[in-house]
């Protein structure tokens, strides 16, 4: 073969490759950072969806849920994102207000949530209860309510800052939901029990594991990680009689998507067994639709609150700033 | 003498080019953020409280760091002992650690369940509670005492050995040496060191929040963070970033006014031998002081190392891949820092007849210290997004921003060194007709090796340990080591995270040691 024909053959091969790549559409899903790591649901979800979709699923990570929304707002209508996965009910109102999201238009399955779900834009994929996690070998009798926590002078808890952390905001709304106008008083009384306020969940949970604090704000599902992954049954979540505030994590389709069918297919896949069965032992949350095989062994040991608390998205957005000021004033005294 | 318009020499052009790049990175990104703002910005009462707290904790932290660093640097300057070099390197470690690792290390020593609380428990005391302003200051001193010590130690090294010999021949004791040599040097060096640490403490936020005990300890940087992710109020974020620059400008101006430059003239670049301070009381005093400082700085590190050792062999492969990626970013960032640093420093020295321009260039070089990482990252994102895929550029952008962030430290080391060479050998070089690149290579480079090595080491180590803007841009498959560490923690893998922290600590220290050592080979210190 003459050099020139080798070159031509090479070119046509390259072109064929490029054409094949163009035939495979790409679905871009923006999500938070911990979703896409090798320990998160990302890799398994990607492999499972690509088996059937005839597409390339590409995850783009941006910090946590709030950073994710900020990213989408910064990019605006020009965003490459087709689906945003990882907002929660506290961010939903602000997300809907941007006008960047389109109604999902799908027949939602029956969700296994303690609350009814009928949002036209966002679909839930997992949920959990906020709770204070403790070590049974260090605390004998965990407090059974905020008032008992206040009364137990030996206890020190670490919480997260609602301005920089999703669980921190969850706790803020938890106290507000449970105590309403009394929330400020409760925070003032809680202040001596609060060892410190951290930037994010990792710092707080790390301080708890290192023994610096007796309890850290986390989820009722956190002990499942220690039990299943580390075979350590000593971690538990304290059940509060006021009820527990929930976090419901959701995904939505962007109005500006260039792959509307794929985006719909992904959202449908998201509530299917394949996706949902990955969630419990990667995101360590409850799946929004319990898989046919049920929850992994170990989840039955978790504490389950009698009462689930959750503000509707619009109300959460409306009271957020006032609740934050209340919190700041009470803890700054 | 009439000033004539001079053609812009290549050296000056490089300096102005570097300055333009830095201006774009710092003030340009603020403009980009402000431009995207939807409403006019306004600062509330909480923002003003944050500004007050920020300035106050930075002032206290800088004062205590410098007050401790002066005797520590003096002890290091006048003592020779086995392991001195290693100690100096190790002392730099806290500065380059990711905040979360350093905080957990500090808590392992000073926390409620820490070493100190354990020691005083049998006496019926404790547990120690460090949360509050004292905790913030403790952490800031932990981070910045080593830097202050290094900056001031360089002041001591800048006094030629001949001066100490002359002082000894004149029969001067420590007090006279302090009056004639050391105090003028400190007058020149300390304000700069103070300002540098004040500025670093201004932009801290995770430390202040975690150890500050609650919303009382809200810094401007946290307010910026809140404006971005909680309120999505870009105007307020940009305004707060400007306030942060304002605070820093005031500090820098104050330092300039207080500092009195000092010129010791040329020496033969020989090792200092000190004949004074040989008495037993001085020796024991210095030894005790160095032991205390080393204990304060190294114990928390030892706790990090001890915690991570067991997890190190079993770390997932992705951690080592991230480590390689971080090494590449650190080396690229170091090359950029040195390039920018030498370009700026040379231009500043050449502009000695135009003090205003030189001052402007120097100020631009220090700007990044006052920049908010959150604003730089977001601003760059806004600027890049219309023209390129920010995710694809994550690693180069991280290297560039890291370089800008360590540039102020490089400049602090390089400007005086290049100025000294120029003042001492400039006329000789000119009379011999040596100029341009040849002069830089033959005359300047050998004489700035030590500060250059220090700058390179610090830059590499800082880049290695800094989470930087990668967190905003990250490609899932392109994590750096600090980002991977945070990811491990977020996935409950606290043990692996401590292993990754130890790996990070070792790599950062090794980088720092290699460069710093490289700069000192053959100079006998």
Image (cartoon, rainbow, N blue to C red):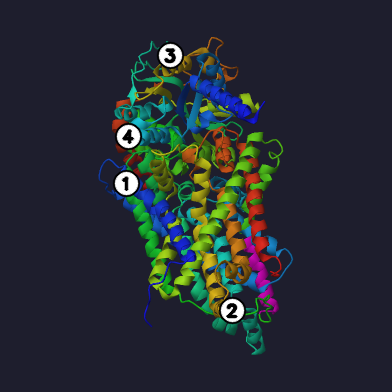
Residue B134 seen by the camera: yes
> Tag 2, which secondary structure?
loop
* Front tag of 4 and 3: 3
Secondary structure state at the residue bearing disc 4: helix
Chain letter behind tag 3? A
Same-chain status of marks 4 and 1: no
Q: Earlier in the sequence, mark 2 or mark 1?
A: 1
Disc 2: host chain: B
Point out residue A17 in the picture as x, y percentages from the top left corner: 56, 23
Q: How many discs mark residues in the rendered view?
A: 4
Q: Is B473 included in the stretch rendered in magenta?
A: no
Residue drawn at point x = 42 percent, y = 33 percent: A68
CA gap, disc 1 and disc 3: 42 Å
Numbered label attached to residue B34: 1
Disc 4 marks which residue? A320
Residue B448 image point, x, y percent:
60, 68
Q: Position of residue B474 (x, y in %)?
A: 50, 37
Q: What is the crowding at mark 1: few (fewer than 14 residues within 10 Å), some, or many (at least 20)?
A: many
* Residue at the spot of label 3: A111
Mark 4 and mark 1 residues within 8 Å of each other at the beta carbon: no
Q: Nearer the viewer, residue B289 or B143?
A: B143
Indicate which disc residue B502 carries. Answer: none
Q: Is residue A56 left or right of residue B374?
A: right
Q: Do callouts 4 and 2 mark residues in contact (Cβ within 8 Å)? A: no
> Which residue is label 2 attached to?
B432
Between the C-alphas of marks 3 and 2, the distance is 85 Å
Q: Nearer the viewer, residue B451 or A198?
A: B451
Q: Extreme front residue here?
A: A2
Question: Is residue A314 left or right of A143 when viewed as pictured?
Answer: left
In this rendering, the label closer to the viewer, 1 or 3: 1
**Residue interval drawn in magenta:** B277-294
């Amino acid at each position: 073969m003459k050099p020139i024909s080798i070159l031509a053959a090479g070119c046509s091969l390259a072109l064929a490759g490029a054409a094949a790549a163009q035939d495979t559409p790409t679905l871009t899903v923006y999500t938070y950072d911990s979703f896409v790591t090798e320990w998160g649901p990302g890799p398994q979800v990607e492999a499972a969806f690509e088996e059937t979709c005839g597409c390339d699923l590409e995850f783009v990570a941006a910090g946590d849920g709030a950073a994710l929304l900020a990213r989408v707002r910064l990019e605006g209508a020009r965003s490459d994102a087709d689906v945003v996965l990882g907002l929660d009910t506290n961010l939903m109102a602000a997300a809907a207000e941007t006008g960047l999201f389109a109604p999902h238009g799908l027949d939602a399955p029956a969700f296994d949530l303690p609350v009814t779900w009928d949002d036209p834009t966002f679909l839930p994929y997992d949920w959990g209860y906020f709770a204070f996690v403790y070590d049974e070998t260090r605390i004998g009798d965990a407090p059974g309510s905020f008032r008992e926590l206040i009364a137990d002078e030996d206890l020190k808890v670490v919480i997260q800052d609602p301005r920089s952390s999703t669980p921190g905001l969850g706790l803020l709304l938890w106290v507000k939901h449970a105590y309403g106008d009394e929330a400020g008083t409760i925070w003032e009384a809680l202040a001596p029990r609060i060892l410190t306020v951290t930037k994010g969940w990792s710092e707080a949970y790390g301080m708890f594991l290192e023994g610096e604090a007796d309890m850290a704000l986390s989820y009722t599902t956190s002990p499942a990680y220690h039990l299943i992954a580390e075979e350590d049954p000593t971690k538990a979540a304290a059940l509060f009689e006021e009820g527990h505030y929930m976090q419901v994590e959701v995904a939505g389709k962007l109005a500006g998507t260039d792959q509307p069918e794929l985006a719909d297919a992904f959202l449908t896949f998201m509530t299917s067994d394949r996706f949902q069965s990955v969630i419990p032992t990667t995101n360590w949350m409850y799946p929004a639709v319990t898989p046919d095989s049920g929850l992994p062994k170990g989840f039955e040991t978790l504490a389950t609150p009698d009462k689930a608390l959750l503000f509707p998205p619009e109300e959460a957005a409306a009271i957020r700033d006032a609740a934050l000021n209340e919190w700041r004033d009470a803890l700054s005294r | 003498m009439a000033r004539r318009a001079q053609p812009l020499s290549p050296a000056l052009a490089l300096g102005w080019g570097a300055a333009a790049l830095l201006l774009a990175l710092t003030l340009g990104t603020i403009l980009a953020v402000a431009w995207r703002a939807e409403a006019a910005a306004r600062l509330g009462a909480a923002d003003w409280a944050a500004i007050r707290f920020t300035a106050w904790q930075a002032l206290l932290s800088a004062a205590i760091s410098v007050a401790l660093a002066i005797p520590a640097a003096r002890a290091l300057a006048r003592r020779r002992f086995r392991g001195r070099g290693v100690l100096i390197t190790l002392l730099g470690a806290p500065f380059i650690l990711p905040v979360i690792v350093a905080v957990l290390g500090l808590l392992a020593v000073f926390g409620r369940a820490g070493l100190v609380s354990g020691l005083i428990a049998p006496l019926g005391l404790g547990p120690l509670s460090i949360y509050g302003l004292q905790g913030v200051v403790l952490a800031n001193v932990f981070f910045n005492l080593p830097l202050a010590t290094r900056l001031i130690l360089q002041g001591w090294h800048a006094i030629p050995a001949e001066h100490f010999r002359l002082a000894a021949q004149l029969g001067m004791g420590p007090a006279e040496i302090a009056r004639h040599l050391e105090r003028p040097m400190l007058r020149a060096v300390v304000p700069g060191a103070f300002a540098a640490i004040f500025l670093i403490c201004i932009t801290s936020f995770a430390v202040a929040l975690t150890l500050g005990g609650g919303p009382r300890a809200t810094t401007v940087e946290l307010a910026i963070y809140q404006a971005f992710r909680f309120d999505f109020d870009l105007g307020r974020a940009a305004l707060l970033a400007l306030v942060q620059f304002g605070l820093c400008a005031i500090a820098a101006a104050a330092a300039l006014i207080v500092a009195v430059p000092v010129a010791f003239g040329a020496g033969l670049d020989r090792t200092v031998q000190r004949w004074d301070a040989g008495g037993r009381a001085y020796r024991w005093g210095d030894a005790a002081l160095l032991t205390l400082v080393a204990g304060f700085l190294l114990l928390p590190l030892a706790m990090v190392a001890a915690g991570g050792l067991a997890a190190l062999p079993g770390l997932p492969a992705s951690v080592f891949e991230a480590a390689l990626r971080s090494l590449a970013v650190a080396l690229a960032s170091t090359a950029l820092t040195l390039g920018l640093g030498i370009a700026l420093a040379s231009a500043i020295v050449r502009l000695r007849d135009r003090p205003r321009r030189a001052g402007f260039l120097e100020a631009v070089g220090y700007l990044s210290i006052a920049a908010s990482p959150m604003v730089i990252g977001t601003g760059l994102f806004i600027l890049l997004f219309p023209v390129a895929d920010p995710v694809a550029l994550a690693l180069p952008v991280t290297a560039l921003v890291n370089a800008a962030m360590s540039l102020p430290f490089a400049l602090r080391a390089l400007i005086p060194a290049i100025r000294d060479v120029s003042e001492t050998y400039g006329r000789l070089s000119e009379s011999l007709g040596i100029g341009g690149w040849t002069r830089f290579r033959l005359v300047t480079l050998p004489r700035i090796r030590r500060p250059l090595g220090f700058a390179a080491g610090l830059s590499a180590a800082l880049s290695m340990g800094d989470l930087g803007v990668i967190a905003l841009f990250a490609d899932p498959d392109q994590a750096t080591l600090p980002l991977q560490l945070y990811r491990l923690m977020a996935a409950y893998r606290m043990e692996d995270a401590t292993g990754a922290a130890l790996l990070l600590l070792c790599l950062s220290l090794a980088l720092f040691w290699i460069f710093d050592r490289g700069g000192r080979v053959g100079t006998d210190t």
